[in-house]
Image (spheres, grey):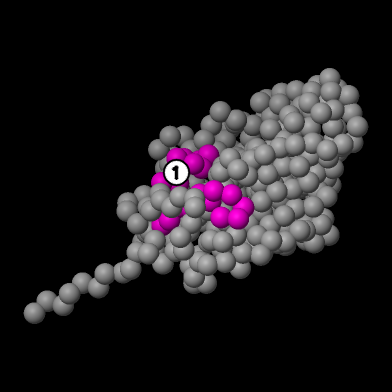
Amino acid sequence: MMAAKRIEPRLLDRLPTVRGRYSEDAALHRITWFRVGGPAEVLFRPLDKDDLAAFLAAVPADVPVMALGVGSNLLVRDGGVAGVVIRLGRGFAALETAGDRVIAGAMALDLSTAKTAARAGIAGLEFLSGVPGTIGGALRMNAGAFGSDMASVLIEATAIDRDGREHCLGRDDMGFAYRSSAVPEDWIFTAATLQGAPGDEPEIAARMADIAQLREASQPLRSRTGGSTFKNPEGASAWELIEAAGCRGLTRGGAMVSDKHCNFLINTGSASAADIEGLGEEVRRRVSETCGVTLEWEIKRVGRHPANAVGGAP
């Protein structure tokens, strides 16, 4: 007699009741800027901060949990993401000003934050107009550009830990370093207060226009990309090392090292996540052999390879 096939329990059946919304086998390639990758086993959109905290307090400890913003600096592997991916919604995107400060929800776009500051005559946050993504992601990786970063402007951030407890973190609590922070990966940022300085709105707008022009001239903004691929090694520029290793225009499947800025990988239209990651690893190998430097990924890579796929086909 043929043995009965063992049926694994649905993750959804193990999750707590929420006021927000769960989606099973949720497509993530539609969210990420690369437009590649497999599904989330479960995608959770909390209604508000209390809903998020209640979920985190009740979700089983063995269930992996990760937050996802707009997917601007993220590569989701083709096998998808096991566990629960949390996508904060509009309730976490509020922006307001108080004196020379901006209070931003974690899902507020960096560009929107810079524009809000400009309209209020708050200078010092113009660099955010050159950072793709959200405030939550910027906190996580100490995002920066054009001479400033989050460590330079943060007053405090709020985050909810894996047990559903809220924390208020000052700048010194964040453990900021170059393109990183020391906050536990399973803590989810909900908001931040940023410090600016009194400024003249036309001058702030002019600075943001200069940033936009520089980005347009030097970066493949109209391509499917994940932003800067590798961190700059100390005392060097990643793009210069990649150029010296002869990688500009290098391809693998549908992935290519940008001709415009060779620290950007792009999806030419048919790339898989494996193409992009494999190309990145080839770039790292060639730079190591040519320049003696091991590049460190700046893009966050998550999920499983296809052999261990989650849910349906990627």
Q: Residue furthest bottom?
A: 1
Label 1 sits on residue: 29
Residue located at (82% from left, 55% from top): 171
- Left or right placement of residue 142 versus residue 4 in this view: right
Q: Residue furthest right?
A: 198
State whether residue 90 is above or below residue 121. Answer: below
Residue located at (31% from left, 69% from top): 8
Label 1 crowd (10 A; few <14 / some 14-19 / many >=20): many
- Left or right placement of residue 106 versus residue 147 in this view: left
Q: Nearer the viewer, residue 192 or 148?
A: 192
State whether residue 118 is above or below residue 10. Answer: above
Residue located at (49% from left, 50% from top): 20
The picture places residue 93, in percent across and down from the top left corner, at: 64, 40
Predominant secondary structure, magenta span: loop
Say if residue 58 shows up in the picture. Answer: yes
Q: Nearer the viewer, residue 235 or 159?
A: 159
Instruction: Name the amino acid, label 1.
Output: His
State whether residue 27 is above or below residue 5. Answer: above
Magenta segment range? 27-51
Quadrant where the N terminus sits is bottom left
The picture places residue 25, in percent across and down from the top left corner, at: 37, 52
The picture places residue 287, in percent across and down from the top left corner, at: 63, 51
Look at the image and say whether residue 25 sits in the magenta stretch: no
Look at the image and say whether residue 50 sits in the magenta stretch: yes
The picture places residue 50, in percent across and down from the top left corner, at: 60, 55
Say if residue 293 shows up in the picture. Answer: no
- Badge 1 element: loop
Residue located at (56% from left, 55% from top): 51
- Numbered-mark total: 1
